[in-house]
Amino acid sequence: MAVPQRPFFPQPPGRSRSAGAVLAVGRRVLVSCPSGATGRATLTDAKGTTPLATLPHGAEVEILGWQPRGAGGTRYSIRSSESGVEGWVGGESLRAPAPPPAPVTAGLAEASRPPKASSPAAAPPRRSGERAPAKAPRRSR
């Protein structure tokens, strides 16, 4: 028996579903101009026809909404953290900030501690079906 296949829809060259990052509403992101630190991103109205303001490369903004535009790319409604100006910008002009580095101090603190004496609290967890270790008898006072 033949298995039904999903229809094939060719994508334009250089364009795929995973080409751009997905940015969530409410997230804080950075403006990333194609020309780098010397450029500015233009904020427009919802239709993308009237320029409202510009933001410098690296400015922090909050995403208020998004709008798919097909081959034109996704557009995001944003608000500047510094000036509070709102407008729409193309997804290619935004990027997620780099994740903070992992804390190194936790690993160093564990390595510098002396080994603990074995105690019932430090015993490894039991597996299903294992018996608990026998308790030491109590001493009378």
Image (cartoon, grey):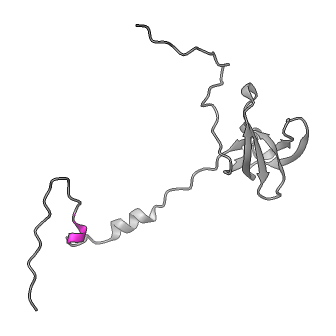
Which residue is painted at 63% across and 39% down in the image? 22
- For the N terminus, give its image quadrant: top left
Which residue is painted at 73% across and 25% down in the image? 71
The residue furthest top is 1
Residue 98 coordinates in the image, percent (x, y): 60, 50
Which residue is painted at 51% across and 13% down in the image? 5
**From what the image shows, is residue 17 above or below residue 33?**
above
| In the foreground, 70 or 101 | 70
Which residue is painted at 80% across and 45% down in the image? 38
Does residue 15 appear left or right of residue 6 in this picture? right
Does residue 122 appear left or right of residue 133 in this picture? right
Residue 130 coordinates in the image, percent (x, y): 14, 56
Most prominent secondary structure in the magenta stretch?
A: helix
Which image quarter: residue 68?
A: top right
Residue 86 coordinates in the image, percent (x, y): 83, 50
- Total marks shown come to 0
The residue furthest bottom is 141
**From what the image shows, is residue 92 above or below residue 72?**
below
- For the C terminus, give its image quadrant: bottom left
Does residue 12 appear left or right of residue 84 in this picture? left
Residue 137 coordinates in the image, percent (x, y): 8, 78
Span shown in magenta: 119-123
Residue 9 in the magenta stretch? The answer is no
Does residue 93 appear left or right of residue 135 in this picture? right
**From what the image shows, is residue 101 above or below residue 119?**
above
